[in-house]
Image (cartoon, helix red, strand yellow):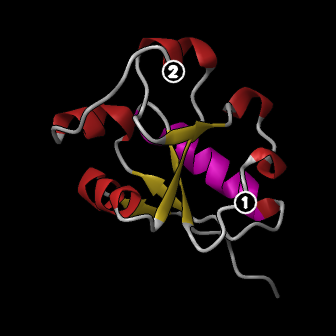
Amino acid sequence: MDKAPIVHDLTAEEVAAGVGDGRYLLVDVREPNEIAVEAYPDAVVVPLSTFDPAAIPDPGSKIVVFACRSGKRSVTASLAAQAAGKPYDSHLAGGIIGWKAAGFPTKTGG
């Protein structure tokens, strides 16, 4: 019997450290209009509205971490990826709202 999908919550501090030292691949699942206004500095973009786990670049040895605005769509993306057979079970709890609240930078223009 397959194990039930689970999504692990990571804090902004954990994600920033993991991206910084090359352990995490941050995948932003927000829409292009949102990313144009404000984006994570080091994320790849795979919008949830057209989400295809195959569109995520090969992470190699990195752990894929999904991110969005508040942490809801990133959970949806993780569950969808797991349903497609990918071992991507981590997300940024609190999304970009929590990221900024923790003092981490964003960029404009995607």
Q: Amino acid at mark 1?
A: Asp
Up the image or down, 105 lies above or below 9; here it is: above
> Residue under circle 2?
110
Left or right: 76, with 68 as reference point: right
Q: What residue appears at the point 47 percent right and 14 percent down from the top-left corner? A: 109
In this picture, which residue range is highlighted in magenta? Answer: 70-82
Callout count: 2
> Residue under circle 1?
58
Q: What residue appears at the point 68 percent right and 71 percent down from the top-left corner? A: 87
Q: From the image, which quarter does the N terminus lie in?
A: bottom right
Q: What residue appears at the point 28 percent right and 39 percent down from the top-left corner? A: 99
In which image quadrant can residue 50 be found?
A: top right
- 42 and 99: which one is in front? 42
Where is residue 107? Give x, y as percent: 36, 23
Up the image or down, 72 lies above or below 108; here it is: below
Q: Is residue 69 magenta?
A: no
Describe the element under mark 2 as helix, strand or loop: loop
Q: Amino acid at mark 2?
A: Gly
Q: What residue appears at the point 43 percent right and 11 percent down from the top-left corner? A: 37
Where is residue 70? Give x, y as percent: 40, 34
- 46 and 91: which one is in front? 46
